[in-house]
Structures are given as C-alpha cells and as structure tokens.
Image (tube, rainbow, N blue to C red):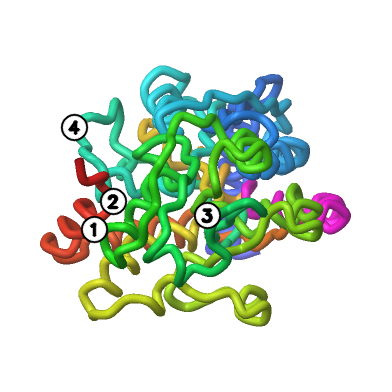
Amino acid sequence: MSRASILAAAILAVCVTFGRAGAEDLASVWRGKTVTIVVGTSAGGGYDTYARMLGRYLGRHIPGNPAVVVTNMPGAGSHLMGGYVAGVAAKDGTFIGAPFSAQPLGPVLEDAAQLRYDPAKLHYLGSADVDAFLCIVGKNAPVKTFAETFQTELIMAGTAETGSTGYLPVLLNNVLGTKFRMVVGYPGTREMTNAIEKGEVHGMCGMNWSSIQTQYATMLKTGQISILAQENLTGHPEMDRMGVPRTGDFAKTEEQRRVLEIVYSQQLSSRPFFVAAEVAPERVAALRKAFMDTWRDPELLAEADKMGLQIGPISGEEVQALLAKIYASPPDLLRQAKEAIKVKR
C-alpha cells in the first residue's frame, strides 16, 4: 500500500471515529432523560390532541430514546406556557412548547414589550399540519349564513384577546364590518364548544377543521354546530366542495385583503412546536429531524387514520422561513394588521 493510501485510510478512520463519538455524545444528551411537551391550552382540545399524539411516538426518534410526557399550561393565549418554556424551563432540549397557532406571530400582532419572551427568537421544530380556520355557530344562533353577520350581532367565545379565537372575530369586525361581540376567558376549544352547546354563546371563530373532524364530527352531523365561513383567502379544498364561503371573498379593497393575508398566514403552521432560543443548534437540528420522522412514523399514521386526525407536517426550517417573510413585511402593513385585531373600545 502506498504512503498516500495509508494516509487516506488513517484520515478516514479518524473521521469515522469522531463521527461515531459525535453521534454517541448527541444520544447521551437525552438518554435516560424525560422530554416534556408543554401544551399552551387545556386538555382535550385539538392542540392537546396533536401534542399527545406526538408524545406517544417522539421518544423513539430522538437520539437516546428519552421518555416523553405531555402536560398542560393554558393561559394568556398560550403565552403563559411560552414564557415558561422560553424563560424558566431547562434550555437543554428537554422542554418543547406546543402553542396556539397565533403565538409565532406575537411580535407582529401584539405588543412585544408586554410578552415575557420573544417568539421571533424561538427555534420552531415544525408544525404537525396545515389547517383551515373556521367560524362556527350553534343551532340556536340568530344567523344561518356569514352574510347575515353584517346585520345581526353574534356573541362569540374566545380564549383571550391575544389568542386567535379572541382576535379573529375582531379582525372580521374591523376589516369587513361584521357584528361579533366577544366573550373571552375560555381555556380551550372544549370549553368553548360546551358553551355553544349550552347556549352561553352563539359560536366561535378560529376552530380548526381537523378538530371538528376528530372531536366534534357528531356535533356537526347532528346540527348542533354548523360552519359559517372559512377564515382564509385561498380556500380549503374540502370546505370549498361543501360550499363554505371564504371570509376573504368579502374584502372590498386590496388593502383589506393584504391585512387578512398577514393574519391568516398562521394557518400554514397551524400546529406549531418550539424550543427555547438558547437550545444548542445541533440539538435543535436533532429535534427537528425527530419531529418530522415522528409524523411519518407508520404506527402514528395508522393511529391518526383511525382517529380521523389530519397529518401534514411542515418542517421547522419551513416554519422559520415563513415567519421571517412575515416579519419582513412593510412596517405600515404590519401596523395595520396589528390595529385590525384590537377591540375598538
């Protein structure tokens, strides 16, 4: 063997050795540990359902195969959980946040100075699905069509003024001229649908189509709830086939459409998951890979199919790129979007 061949073999051996050591070190980060997924909503809702599905399979795809537990921390439109995961919990890759879809847009749509953390600096692992937001009403609501909401007041449930179910109806009031009156303070969709069923409120905006399919299909089938409109500009194929109108079609100007587009962009990452900004890049990369691998796990997909749970994962890199694009929108447009979701007092 020539000296060149010997040198090449030696270099290859060193590279392989260091590669294996690196892999073993990464596995040691999580081996014997517990990863906690903290859900920013109450138990039993759609966000909680996706988080618990992820939790059942994620551990087998993370290096070191840690145990995974899911807990709930509802409040302030999932910002209570966001502040905990971003500012209080360990920053070693053992805590994952599962917020409302609106949470990543906090720096755009809310007063960033009021938040205990900066959502723009978090590392997003990805989203479990691309979904459609819907306005729904109960059977005793005084309207049957979205067009009627411009003349008749509806009492709508929401989690918080800063949460999507709180500000999406307000957005329609301010941009299009609907007559929704908000009652906020509900922990999650389960409590809001209970309130609709009891007649405490007429409906809600911001319900996910996937949640209806998996949790409230019976209520839809029996007429206890009906879909008033889909909250987007482009339409969801299934909703379009059902003839459900798009709120974007009621916009009268291009400016109105652009404001709606900014706010509705969150649907492209409707089930987001994140880790704190301080988590090391190599750990973020490993968790992002594990996240995508989990949603492609055959056993998970089989379980999701039985539940009727829609799975369409978006990578962390795609979510991060989408957010960067939104953050870079013209300042005047972002200002208009922020003003459009505020209750006029």
State which mark lies toward you, 3 or 1: 1
Pointer 1: what residue?
337
Was residue 298 drawn as part of the magenta stretch in this picture?
yes
Residue bearing the label numbered 2:
341
Residue 7 vertical placement versus 107 (above, below): below
Question: In the structure shown, which secondary structural element does the residue marked by tag 1 occupy?
Answer: helix
In this view, the mark in front (3 or 2): 2
Residue at the spot 35% in from the left edge and 39% down from the top edge: 162
**Residue 74, image x and y in percent?**
52, 27
Residue bearing the label numbered 3: 270
Which stretch did the figure color magenta?
290-308
Q: Is residue 6 left or right of residue 64?
A: left
Q: Quadrant of residue 69?
A: top right
Which quadrant of the rendered structure holds the N terminus? bottom right
Q: CA distance from mark 4 to mark 3?
A: 24 Å
**Is residue 254 on the magenta stretch?**
no
- Residue 216 position, x and y percent, is 74, 50
Q: Amino acid at mark 1?
A: Ala
Which residue is the site of mark 4?
Answer: 113
Residue type at mark 3: give it. Answer: Ser
Residue at the image point whose x is 34% and y is 49% from the top: 105
Whole-Å distance between the Cαs marked 3 and 2?
Answer: 18 Å
Instruction: Tell whether label 1 touches label 2 (CB within 8 Å).
Output: yes
Q: Are marks 3 and 2 in contact (CB under 8 Å)?
A: no
Instruction: Look at the numbered discs 2 and 4 and tell me whether their residues touch, using CB distance below 8 Å.
Output: no
Q: Are marks 1 and 4 in contact (CB under 8 Å)?
A: no
Q: CA distance from mark 2 to mark 1?
A: 7 Å
